[in-house]
């Protein structure tokens, strides 16, 4: 599995996203409450730019007459037709057992682990105080 450095943790603050092109694929990397997730930037409905859509939450199960909002920043709405997907799993919100968007593994790694990953490349010691967001394809 190839690793691709997307940027530092500070470059993608909580509630934000970064859309990158990796290996000919457009992928959105999201920071949801300090956890990072990655989704293919293509809605399975009609290929719309899914990761450019609105991040929101949803109504949670509750008693009659009670309205509870939750999962704020975890539901991604396609900007073309409003289809909704769970950022944390890639599953569609309306039919999670049959429809999903491709998700990718994302890790947060230190400078030392990045250097160890590619020891064959000639490099020079550089000090960086951030951690890196790494996409695994």
Image: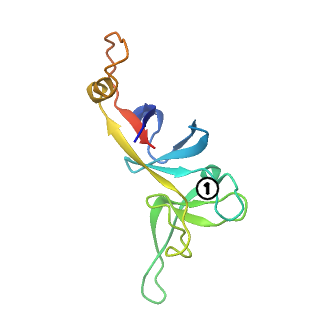
Residue tagged by mark 1?
Answer: 54
Q: Which image quarter holds the N terminus?
A: top left
Quadrant in which the C terminus appears: top left
Q: In the image shown, does 87 or 98 lie closer to the viewer?
A: 98
- 103 vs 31, nearest the viewer: 103
Q: Is residue 100 left or right of residue 35?
A: right
The picture quadrant where one finds residue 101 is: bottom right
Viewed as shown, does residue 42 lie left or right of 29?
right
Task: Please tell me whether residue 93 is drawn above or below residue 52 in the rendered image.
Answer: below
| Side (left or right) of 61 relative to 115 | right
Q: Position of residue 72 (x, y in %)?
A: 47, 60
User: Which element type, helix, strand or loop, lies under badge 1?
Assistant: strand
Residue at 72% across / 65% down in the picture?
81
Whether 63 is drawn above or below 20: the answer is below
User: Which residue ends up furthest to the bottom in the rendered image?
Assistant: 64
Note whether 75 is above or below 4 in the view shown.
below
The answer to which quarter of the image holds residue 14 is top left
Residue at coordinates 44% horizontally, 61% vertically from top-left? 89
Q: Position of residue 98 (x, y in %)?
A: 54, 74
Residue 62, horizontal then vertical, whole percent = 42, 83
The residue carrying pointer 1 sits among few (fewer than 14), some (14 to 19) or many (20 or more) residues within 10 Å by Cα, namely some
Please provide percent x and percent y for residue 30: 48, 47
Colour treatment of the image: rainbow
């Amino acid at each position: 599995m190839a690793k691709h450095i997307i940027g530092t943790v500070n470059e993608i603050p909580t509630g934000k996203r970064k859309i990158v092109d990796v290996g000919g694929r457009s992928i959105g990397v999201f920071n949801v409450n300090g956890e990072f997730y990655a989704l293919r930037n293509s809605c399975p409905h009609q290929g719309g730019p899914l990761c450019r859509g609105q991040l929101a939450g949803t109504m949670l199960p509750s008693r009659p007459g009670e309205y509870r909002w939750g999962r704020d920043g975890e539901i991604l709405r396609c900007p073309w037709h409003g289809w909704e997907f769970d950022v944390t799993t890639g599953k569609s919100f309306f039919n999670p057992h049959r429809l999903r968007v491709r998700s990718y593994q994302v890790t947060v790694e230190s400078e030392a682990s990045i250097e160890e990953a590619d020891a064959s490349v000639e490099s020079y010691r550089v000090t960086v105080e951030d951690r890196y967001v790494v996409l695994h394809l």
